[in-house]
Image (cartoon, rainbow, N blue to C red):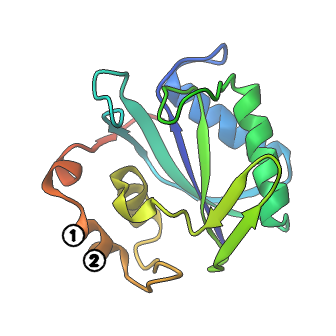
Amino acid sequence: MVILSLGSNLPSKYGDKFENLKYAISLLEDRDILLNKKSSFYETPSYPDKSKPKFANMVISIKTSLSPVNLMTIIIDIEKKLERIRKNKNDPRTCDIDIIDYKDQIIKIKNNNFYLEIPHKSLVSRNFVLYPLQEILPNWKHPKTKEILSVLINKLNEEDRKSILKINKN
């Protein structure tokens, strides 16, 4: 099983931040990637500048025979199609897709276009990954530390535990 985190806090020509995430999923499915489960949408403040637009986030589990590098190449293509512009770290964006877990493997790959580390190095501090992940895969364990989600969520600071909102949108 492969787990992806999706986020958006800017509209694109395809719609608002929620529509961007829905469209990103349909583009993944167009590439013979099978959607297994998807979380609800969650909204979180922009980081580190909370004055920027709030993010819509979700987590999906997928089935794919693609290698991590080929999957990452497709993800970058989808982000470009959704008009993502990469300038500065943490800038607002139309679409951001991260590989959180790839079949419980620990992977580090340096490529000319990107550096890929799986499990995602920041996932343990990201409420917008942990809460949606708990919704769809409550028994998931971190591939490196073997910690369960409830332990990881309890390690979040109080602000991170309170600043996430589940959004009921189809």
Looking at the picture, does residue 46 appear above or below residue 139? above
On screen, residue 26 versus residue 8, left or right, reads right
Looking at the picture, does residue 125 appear above or below residue 42? below
On screen, residue 34 versus residue 156, left or right, reads right
Rendered residue at 28%/28% (across/down): 50
**SS category of the residue bearing label 2:** helix
Q: Position of residue 63 (x, y in %)?
A: 73, 66
Residue at mark 2 to residue at mark 1: CA–CA distance: 5 Å
On screen, residue 39 versus residue 42, left or right, reads right
Rendered residue at 50%/64% (across/down): 121
Looking at the picture, does residue 146 appear above or below residue 12? below
Residue hosting label 1: 154
Give the camera-side residue of 4 and 70: 70
Q: Quadrant of the N terminus?
A: bottom right
Disc 2: CA contacts within 10 A as few (<14), some (14-19) or many (>=20): few
Give the camera-side residue of 170 and 49: 49
Rendered residue at 43%/47% (across/down): 40
Residue hosting label 2: 151
Rendered residue at 54%/29% (across/down): 88
- Choose top left, top right, bottom left or bottom right for residue 19: top right
Instruction: Determine whether label 2 and label 1 are within 8 Å by CB.
Output: yes
Give the camera-side residue of 104 and 88: 88
Instruction: Return the mark for residue 112.
Output: none
- Choose top left, top right, bottom left or bottom right for residue 165: top left
Residue type at mark 1? Asn
Q: Position of residue 6 (x, y in %)?
A: 55, 44
Residue type at mark 2? Val
**SS category of the residue bearing label 1:** helix
